[in-house]
Image (tube, grey):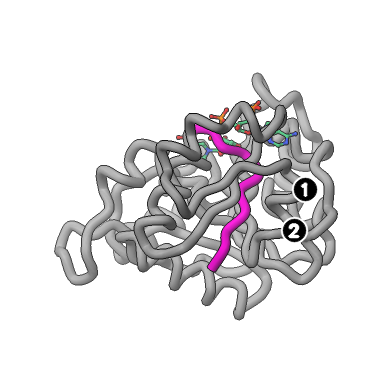
Amino acid sequence: MKIGFIGSGNIGRTVASCFLRAGHSVVMSNSRSPETLSDLVKELGPKAKAATAEQAAHEGDLIVVTVPLYALPKLSTSGTDGKVIIDTMNYYPFRDGHIASLDDGTATTSELTAEHFPNARVVKAFNSIIASEIQTTAKPQGDPQRRTLPIAGNDAEAKKTVIDLIESIGFDVYDAGALHEGYRFQNGTPAYCARANRDELIHLLQQA
Ligand SMILES: NC(=O)c1ccc[n+]([C@@H]2O[C@H](COP(=O)([O-])OP(=O)(O)OC[C@H]3O[C@@H](n4cnc5c(N)ncnc54)[C@H](OP(=O)(O)O)[C@@H]3O)[C@@H](O)[C@H]2O)c1
């Protein structure tokens, strides 16, 4: 699969290198220009290239949106129709400004992402793990220490695609349900960034 990244920071570059190791190719982008990503793509290797955010969306069979939430309204929707979008974003009012629907709990960050990309199939994933731990805590299938990561989304087929991808890079996955259920593993909840197995994670998600 070719995976387009909108955002190439801590999470973007780490997830990209895991997807590359799993045999995929990646198209990286940021808020500036592809030239500013030349060191990164050199480091990631021949199956990585840099592009504009719009090109990354167009070229990606699947898209990872991994920018600060304040940048979401600025992102182009071009090239996203029908595609699976992995949304890694968290909400930090000190960084992102206050968003009323998040402050009062009527919406989740990923529901805002789905509103912004109305024809894409958004799956919330990778928001609940610290970037550096994506590589340091990955374990092979069957390892007793293998960690379970939560996802949420409204489209079953999209979730299956994301589950397969995450399982291939060293984690089990727990489907927490519809996109709105993402509130159970947003930052500030007991499940957020927990190093948990499936049963422990289910228990933590129920506490939110
Ligand atoms: N860091 C973590 O451990 C962690 C864990 C879970 C979830 N998250 C969440 O995941 C998201 C990404 O986190 P991060 O730590 O990777 O952030 P980061 O290191 O600050 O990187 C953000 C990336 O987004 C790009 N960007 C910003 N505005 C953009 C725009 N308009 N168009 C295209 N790209 C744009 C930035 O490009 P420039 O460099 O050109 O500005 C940069 O490549 C955040 O919402 C964060 O809360 C982070």
Q: Are marks 2 and 1 in contact (CB under 8 Å)?
A: yes
Badge 2 density bin: few <14, some 14–19, many ≥20, Cα 10 Å: some
Viewer-side residue, 110 vs 34: 34
What amino acid is labelled 2 in the image?
A: His
Residue 56 in sight in this render: yes
State the SS at label 1.
helix
Residue 133 shown in magenta: no
Dividing the picture into quadrants, the one containing residue 198 is: bottom left
Identify residue for label 2.
58
Residue 58 percent location from the top left of the image: 75, 58
What amino acid is labelled 1 in the image?
A: Glu
Badge 1 density bin: few <14, some 14–19, many ≥20, Cα 10 Å: some
State the SS at label 2.
helix
Residue 154 percent location from the top left of the image: 67, 70
* Ligand 1 visible in quadrant: top right
Q: Is residue 140 shown left or right of residue 170?
A: left
Residue 2 shown in magenta: yes
Q: Residue at left 51%, top 46%?
A: 127
Mark 1 CB lies closer than 8 A to ligand 1: no
Q: Residue at left 53%, top 68%?
A: 1
- In the rendered image of this protein, does residue 54 appear above or below residue 124? above
Dividing the picture into quadrants, the one containing residue 14 is: top left
Q: What numbered label is drawn on residue 113?
A: none
Residues shaded magenta: 1-9
- In the rendered image of this protein, does residue 143 appear above or below residue 36? below
